[in-house]
Image (spheres, rainbow, N blue to C red):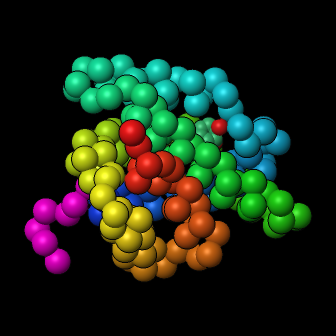
Amino acid sequence: QSPTPSGFERVAELSAQRLLLADAVAASKRASGKPVEDAQREGEQLARVREQATARALPAEPTAAFFRAQMEANKLVQYRLLAEPGRAGAAVDLAPVRAKLDAINAQLLDALPAALSQGSGDDCARRASDARKRAARRHRLDELHRTALARAFGDLCRSP
Ligand SMILES: C=C(O[C@@H]1C=C(C(=O)O)C=C[C@H]1O)C(=O)O
């Protein structure tokens, strides 16, 4: 393994970490009865990443699109878990989970320039898939979280 992970390796790793937090978010929403989707919270994150993208001379629109994909993937996991009836678990406090999501967002922003520059070429889908498979293995992701990990990459291989 190379000492410096590629942009896709980093994004796959951080996306997997972000998706694993969806289980705790779903548990909190099962207990609170709150909807999966929180448009205001999504808007706040998007405003923040757009600001940071501009400050770092990153393209704002592909950056925002990437984070929308991350959030869609998170909701996919939550909807699937909450579709299982019953299974009451311990109540989970959402605020500290959101703080962790914010921390991962910051790391994803650091990884994004390299990932965006890798997002072209015939073998993009292959490289992205390989990076996801390695992250999935490291974290022992099940089928649901593997599907969501593909969703989390969004259009990285199809950016203009
Ligand atoms: C993770 C949450 O659920 C959804 C997914 C979000 C995300 O991935 O950041 C943000 C808001 C919600 O639409 C949450 O409410 O914090």
Q: Is residue 76 above or below residue 67?
A: below
Whether residue 35 appears in this view of the structure is: yes
Query: Where is ligand 1, by quadrant?
Result: top right
Residue 14 appears in which quarter of the rendering?
bottom left
What x and y, as percent, mark residue 84?
A: 83, 65
Dominant SS of magenta comes to loop
At horizontal 39% and vertical 34% (from top left) the residue drawn is 63
Residue 148 appears in which quarter of the rendering?
bottom right
At horizontal 79% and vertical 57% (from top left) the residue drawn is 82
At horizontal 42% and vertical 28% (from top left) the residue drawn is 61
Q: Is residue 21 left or right of residue 102?
A: right
What x and y, as percent, mark residue 42?
A: 58, 30
Does residue 131 belong to the magenta stretch? no
Quarter placement of the C terminus: top left
The residues colored magenta run: 1-7
What x and y, as percent, mark residue 8?
A: 31, 59
At horizontal 59% and vertical 52% (from top left) the residue drawn is 73
Q: Is residue 64 above or below residue 145?
A: above
Q: Is residue 91 above or below residue 63?
A: below
Quarter placement of the N terminus: bottom left
Q: Is residue 78 above or below residue 29?
A: below
Q: Is residue 134 left or right of residue 73?
A: left
